[in-house]
Image (tube, grey):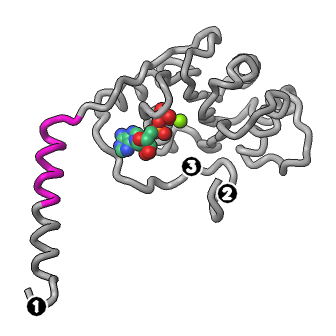
């Protein structure tokens, strides 16, 4: 995680978010109807960007916060609960958290938890998600994973490869024309 960002806070976008209108709508709809939504697809397809985009627009529905647990760097499934506790601001790395205490904390709260990159910890994520969802009625989870987690009630949204709609292409051509004009205007002696 980059310096200057608190654990669990959603990161700002460093590049323009492109397209994905239909997928954004699909994920938002899925999250309204289900308490665990998993975005699936191969690495690099755009799962994380899509999840973060949906999560950052979902704040109003979750009074107690939208939190991101970035699991890509976590190798030990035994540390998953700790990592999630840390991501919702509960502990530093040294504290030990049990699922029941995490569930106690979340029981009366309205929280959206983004579990990003679950694939290498899929079993541990499935067990944790199942326990938390059963124990915490105000919790929703948006997960990204190469494959479905296999939890009861999970809704899967497969993420397709990006297409560039004609309108986006046209806009970006316009932008590059404007950019070229500006460069010419500001060129020394030009
Ligand atoms: N809708 C999008 N608009 C702009 N860039 C995107 C979009 N989706 C993905 N990317 C970029 O493509 C790369 C891979 O996306 P990412 O969400 O990390 O994929 P995944 O999580 O499936 O591995 C990243 O650099 C990301 O910023
Ligand atoms: Mg990802």
Q: Position of residue 99 (x, y in %)?
A: 84, 27
Q: Residues within 10 Å of mark 2 (few under 14, many from 20)?
A: few
- Distance from Cα at disc 1 to Cα at disc 3: 45 Å
- Give the mark, 2 or 1, whose residue is nearer the N terminus: 2
Q: Residue at x 12, y 52 (%)?
A: 173
The residue at which mark 2 appears reads as: 6
Q: Nearer the viewer, residue 140 or 127?
A: 127
Give, as a single range, the part of the protein colored magenta: 164-176
Number of marks in the rendered image: 3
List the residue tagged with mark 1.
189
User: Quick check: 188 left or right of 12?
Assistant: left
Which residue in the structure is indicated by mark 3? 10
Which x, y percent locates residue 136?
A: 72, 25
User: In the shown orientation, is residue 87 left or right of residue 177?
Assistant: right
Q: What is the x, y in percent for residue 171?
A: 15, 50
Give the SS element for disc 2.
Answer: loop
Is residue 165 inside the magenta stretch? yes
Indicate which quadrant contains ligand 1: top left
Verify CB contact (< 8 Å) between mark 3 and mark 2. no
Left or right: where 43 falls relative to 128: left
- Disc 3 crowd, CA 10 A, few/some/many (<14, 14-19, 20+): some
Q: Is residue 153 left or right of residue 43?
A: right
Q: Is residue 142 visible?
A: yes
Figure check: 71 above or below 133: below
Quarter containing the C terminus: bottom left
The residue sitting at the bottom extreme is 189
Magenta stretch: includes residue 1: no
How far apart in space, not on screen, are marks 2 and 1 (Cα)?
47 Å
Quadrant of res 2: bottom right
| Mark 3 vs mark 2, CA separation in Å | 9 Å
In front here: 127 or 173? 173
């Amino acid at each position: 995680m980059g310096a200057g960002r608190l654990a669990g806070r959603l990161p700002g976008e460093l590049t323009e978010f492109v397209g994905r209108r239909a997928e954004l709508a699909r994920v938002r709809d899925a999250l309204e109807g289900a308490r665990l939504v998993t975005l699936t697809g191969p690495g690099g397809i755009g799962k994380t960007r899509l999840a973060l985009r949906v999560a950052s627009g979902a704040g109003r529905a979750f009074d107690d916060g939208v939190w991101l647990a970035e699991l890509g760097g976590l190798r030990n499934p035994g540390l998953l609960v700790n990592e999630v506790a840390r991501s919702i601001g509960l502990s530093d790395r040294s504290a030990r958290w049990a699922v029941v205490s995490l569930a106690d904390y979340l029981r009366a709260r309205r929280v959206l938890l983004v579990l990003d990159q679950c694939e290498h910890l899929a079993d541990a994520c499935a067990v944790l998600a199942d326990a938390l969802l059963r124990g915490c009625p105000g919790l929703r989870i948006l997960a990204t994973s190469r494959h479905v987690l296999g939890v009861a009630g999970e809704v899967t949204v497969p993420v397709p490869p990006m297409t560039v709609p004609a309108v986006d292409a046209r806009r970006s051509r316009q932008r590059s024309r404007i950019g070229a004009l500006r460069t010419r205007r500001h060129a020394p002696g030009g």
